[in-house]
Every structure is written in structure tokens, then in C-alpha cells.
Amino acid sequence: MATGYGELLRSRHAVRLLCGTLVGRLPSATGHIAIVLFVRSEGGGYALAGALAAVYGLATAVGQPLLGRAVDLWGQPRVMLPAAVLSGAGMAALAVVGAESLPPACAAVVVAGVCTPPLEGGLRALWPAVLGREDRVHAAYALDAVAQEVMFTAGPLLVTLFVAWWSPGAALLVINVLGVLGALSVVVSEPSRRWRSAPREAHWLGALRSPGLLALLCSFLFVGVALGSITVAAVAYADDHGRESVYGWLMAALGLGALIGGAVYGARRWAGEPERRLRVLVGLLALGYLPLSLTPSVAAMTGLAVVSGLFLAPALACAFVVVDRHAPPGTVTEAFSWLVTVFGVGAALGTGAAGPAVEWGGTAPGFWVAGVGGVAALLVLLATSRVLNGRGRGGDPVVSSENDRNGAVEPGFSAGHQA
């Protein structure tokens, strides 16, 4: 039976948490672009701008699982709001010191990146407790994936508008003020204040002691590789056709495909084990990436881009369910944050691999990287099916939510608990 998005959004706290999280994630979605525009406006070269943006990305990747673990230990408000303030202060420091003095600028972006609050993982940890029913949680994960595509499309546009209205420095400040306000909206909400992680076993590996979670993370590292390579290959394709606007069309088509796919996927309830369904979705995702290397006419390529994006949001939504099923007790925020990290690292690797591929053989080899990444992601899931199929909590069968005191959440979900 289909689950209506309207019913989901009418649930108490749902709209506030979703919107607050999206606004709070604006700095992480647009930080690299804002940094590049700011450094260029200060007279810095593209190499310096790219290096600072890369440092920011790496610092964010390091900080997400660490802060996610802190949230699991001490709760969302005590970690996320101070982290958001420190991250915003780091970007403000960059706007003040400028890019001429490299050590202070680098230190500022490291602070901004490492302290980026794990709002994505925090929201996904809250959904089961807020929505209760499994079908609603599935729909929320799909809506979250769709909203993420919208944010990563609209966020850069918002930065360019702020730059046009004011200045690159002002854009840095405004985006991060909005980020702090978004995080504040989330952490002062009742679900965030009351949420507590399940009791956890002290272990230095934390969430990473789960074989199933490690298998999933390895797979989505390669999904990230595919997406990162497409951004570079699409630029080369646009250059081949002599129009910069072609790049925008291809990226918009990818986002449109993900939006359509996520909306359709989340509008119904799916039976069966999500681990098996994930293999199908990732297989379809890989199949959608392979034809891009044909590099046909712009109209046909735009259509292929829509198709290649169709299964991204469904695969992400299904992966969120699998993460929740396999995260060891008391590590759900950290586990979701690890997914964010490996996805970002994979995208960086894909960007780095596609550049030489394009220089070596032209546009088509750049898209080959995407196809190889998709196929590799599927092969990982196939090779690790034994640890993924119906297993969870570090290898124990998933039989019930160990966190749900009232039995409101269906088997396989760890909602945390309400104090």
C-alpha cells in the first residue's frame, strides 16, 4: 500500500526537522564553491582555491564520524549546536583573514570542516522515533534523498546569488549564519532534545565493527566515485560541444532523474529484505551509468543523464535502511555519518580519476570511470551478500529494534529512545 508524502509531512515535527536539517546543511553543500569564489575574489589562483576547498572537504570527511560518535554518546544538542557555531566561526575567520596568508586560511577551513555538524546522520537517527511506522520511515528516507538532490542543486545557485547581491565574503558569512540557524532549529526541537542513543558497547571501532556496515560503506565508496567522475566528464562533454550551458543541463538532468526516482520509490511500501533490494537498485544504477560513455548528441545525452539519475535516490534511501539495520547498538548517528564520509571521499577519488582519464582518451573514458564505479559498487554487494543478508548489529540477526520501548517501530529499526 502506497505511503503518501502528505501523511508523512503532516506528522508532528517532520517538516521542522527536514527543513531545519536542509538549511543547516547548506554550508557543507556549498562550502567548497563559496571558498573558491572567495579566494578568487581575493586575487588567489585556482590552485590555491582548489587546495583550500579540498582541505575543507577532507576535514569535513574526518569530522563527520567523530562528531557522529559524540552525538551517540552525549546527545544531539550538546554536540551539534556548538559544532555548528565553531564551523561558522571558522568560515567567518576565513572571510576576515583572507587568502593571502595561507596558514591562518588553512586553519580556518580545517576548523570549519571538522566542526561541520552531522545533521544528516542525526536526522536519519530521529526518523524512526518521530514517525514510528516502518513504511513512514522508508518514505522519509526517500524524501530525505530527494531533498538532498534539491539542496545540492539549489545551494550553489544561492551562493552565486549572494555573491551577486553582496560579495563572496558576505556569501561565506550568510551561508554559515543560515547553517547555524538551521542546526539551532533542529536541536531545540522536542525529538532532538529527548533522543538518546541505545546503550553501546565500548569499542574503539565504534560502528565500524559491523561487517555488514563495512560492506555497505565499501560499496557506496564506489557509488561516490561514479558521481564524482560524472562531474568532470560532463565538463569535458560540454567543452566538446562548445557550450558551457550543456554542463548545467546535464547536472540538472541527473538531479531531475534522482528526484523522479526518489519520489516514486518513496511513494510505496516495499516488501522483502532491503539488503536484497539494494543489490537490485545498485545494479540498475550501474546499468544507467554505462551508456553515458557513448556520448551521443546533447539531447540524447540529457535523456541518458535523466535515466542515470533515476536509481540514485532510491539506492540512497534503501542504503539508509540497511545502515540502521547493521549499525551496532548505540552507534546509529556515527554509522550514518560514516556513509556521508565515504560518499564524499569516493566523489573526490572519482573526480581525481576522471581528470587523467579525460586527458588520456577524451570524454568517453571520463564516463567509463562512472560505469566502472557503478559496477564495482554492485560487485562489492554481491561479494558480501553473506554478511548483509538478514544480518545486523555487528553480525546478529535483526529481530527487533533494541531501542524502541513502546514497540512502535517495526523490526529492523533502531530509533534511539526518548528520555
Image (cartoon, helix red, strand yellow):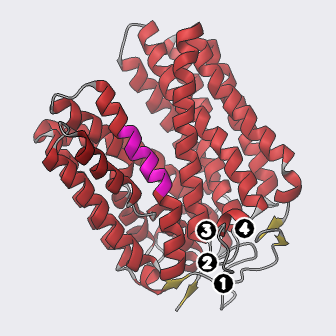
Label 1 close to label 4 by CB (< 8 Å): no
* Quarter location, residue 304: top right
Label 2 close to label 1 by CB (< 8 Å): yes
Instruction: Name the amino acid, label 1.
Output: Asn
Calculate the distance from the C-alpha at mark 2 to the C-alpha at mark 1: 6 Å
- Left or right: residue 216 versus residue 198 is right
Which residue matches tag 4?
325
Determine whether the residue tagged by mark 2 lies in a helix, strand or loop: loop
Residue depicted at 72% across the width and 67% down the height: 325
Give the mark toward the camera: 3 or 4: 4
Instruction: Name the amino acid, label 3.
Output: Val
Label 2 close to label 4 by CB (< 8 Å): no
On the question of residue 417 being in view, the answer is: yes
Q: Which of marks 2 and 1 is nearer the N terminus?
A: 1
Mark seen at residue 415: 2
Compared with residue 95, is residue 128 higher up or lower down, i.e. above or below? below
Give the mark toward the camera: 2 or 3: 2
Label 3 close to label 1 by CB (< 8 Å): no
Give the mark toward the camera: 3 or 1: 1
What stretch of residues is rendered in magenta?
A: 53-62
Which of the pair 186/377 is nearer the observer? 377
Instruction: Name the amino acid, label 4.
Output: Arg
Which residue matches tag 1?
403
Calculate the distance from the C-alpha at mark 1 to the C-alpha at mark 4: 12 Å
At label 4, counting other C-alpha atoms closer than 10 Å, the crowd grade (few under 14, some 14-19, many 20 or more) is: many
Calculate the distance from the C-alpha at mark 2 to the C-alpha at mark 4: 11 Å
Which residue matches tag 3?
137
Compared with residue 112, is residue 43 higher up or lower down, i.e. above or below? above
Q: Which residue lies furthest to the right in this view?
A: 386
